[in-house]
Image: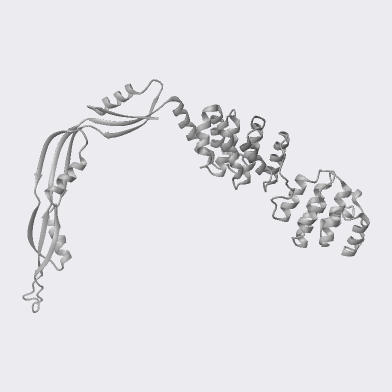
Amino acid sequence: MSYLLVEADSLAEARSEAQKKTPQGSTIIREYVADTGGLHTIVATGATIEEARMESEKQLPANFTLIDKQETESESKSLRVSANSEYEAREAARILTQGTTVQTADLVVPRKKGFLGIGKKTPQYDVLLLKKATVTIKYESKARIEVTIASPEELTELKITSLIEKLSLKPPPLALYHPENKKAMDEIKQHGKYALKPLLQALDGSDEEARTTIIYLLGCIQQTKEQIIPIANQLKHKSSRIRNEAISVLGKFAAENSTDPEFLNYLKQAACDANIQVRREAQKILGSLNVTMPDVFWYTGTNTWDEIADAFIALEIKKPAPDFIGLDRQLQRFSAPERHGAWVHVAQDMQSIDIEKSMRCYIEALYNNPIPNSVAWGWLSGMNNAKMNVIAPNSHKTQQVIEELRRKMRPICE
């Protein structure tokens, strides 16, 4: 953007001149009126005439034509006032002498009570007043305006920046997008490559809602080197939602950046991400590029028993030989009810893959915590699936029953 200062005899003429000096195709987007022009009057005051002059000079514009100047020196005078207190004396003097400042108020005649009201006197004060020095200047000046001019490209960027501000709007209940948010996204997409610069400028300063959407929009623009690393840098963000969006977009640009060491380094770090979806997508991208992946265990980044179970289901359960031994080892640091919950969770997802392994997972759940009201008893007695009936319906729900069944079917984690 460019800036232009214009002077003319009137405000209308200044605006007309600014329009003439604006390059073809560009637009004035902002105007600041520094001086309306015409005849002006300044009245400045001070304790001394020098102070009043200095104050008047501060108010004068750079260019003006002096019409008239009048100066009045400061003046002190004393006024005797009858009042019940110094405060009342000061106030009375101030009201009686407009435009002056009270300097001091000295008691000169004290209060006299008198006798039975006879001879009573109100205190009197001598009040010293200061009438400030005054400088009055009449002058004439030209109208002066400062305008900001934007080229067509800059105007487009400003419009996009305004649209980006709407991306933080939270969607109403049961909706994926806020109506204004969705409208803004569609308009930004239409600008194509012109949206790249304002999107990148807004990326790091946006909240989670807007940042996720900005990453998505950057993925909709034809790839340039300029946008890849800023998107990849979002893989370091604490929000798993933002990291998931970033890895999803980077997958679109992987083939064109397969030899970029910085890009590959970001992917390798994401391959060890605590979030399962981010980790799996990063490993998938690296695999498609035939890049050697770092040694990453399926449970990398997990901290709770349910995170361990989710990671196992997402990354191991469909393998020919899932790592049940590793699952058992990872669960050992948790309580019996938590270990039970993890094995039940895995067993339920295993049912559609391998019924026998599913039963052995239910057995492992009860082996860790044989609570009578566990859903595992129902599954193993065939109540939900006849093919899984390995316990008689009238069997006692005890640790001994489960241990015998576990020996018979062999522990799944050995």
Q: Hey, which quadrant is residue 136 in on the image? A: top left
Furthest residue toward top: 24
Front-lying residue, 222 or 142: 222
Q: Is residue 396 left or right of residue 338?
A: right
Give the quadrant of the N terminus: top left
Colour option used: one colour
Give the quadrant of the C terminus: bottom right
Furthest residue toward bottom: 115
Furthest residue toward left: 119
Q: Is residue 171 left or right of residue 304?
A: left
Q: Residue at x 22, y 35 (%)?
A: 62
Residue 23: % across, % down = 37, 22
Residue 341: % across, % down = 77, 56
Front-lying residue, 141 or 329: 329
Would you place residue 67 above or below residue 393 in this image? above
Q: Hey, which quadrant is residue 255 in on the image? A: top right
Front-lying residue, 9 or 393: 9
Residue 191 seen in the current view? no
Q: Is residue 33 left or right of residue 206?
A: left
Residue 111 seen in the current view? yes
Would you place residue 264 above or below residue 16 in this image? below
Q: Hey, which quadrant is residue 8 in on the image? A: top left
Residue 293: % across, % down = 72, 41
Q: Residue at x 92, y 57 (%)?
A: 391
Residue 344: % across, % down = 80, 54
Q: Residue at x 6, y 76 (%)?
A: 118
Q: How many marks?
A: 0
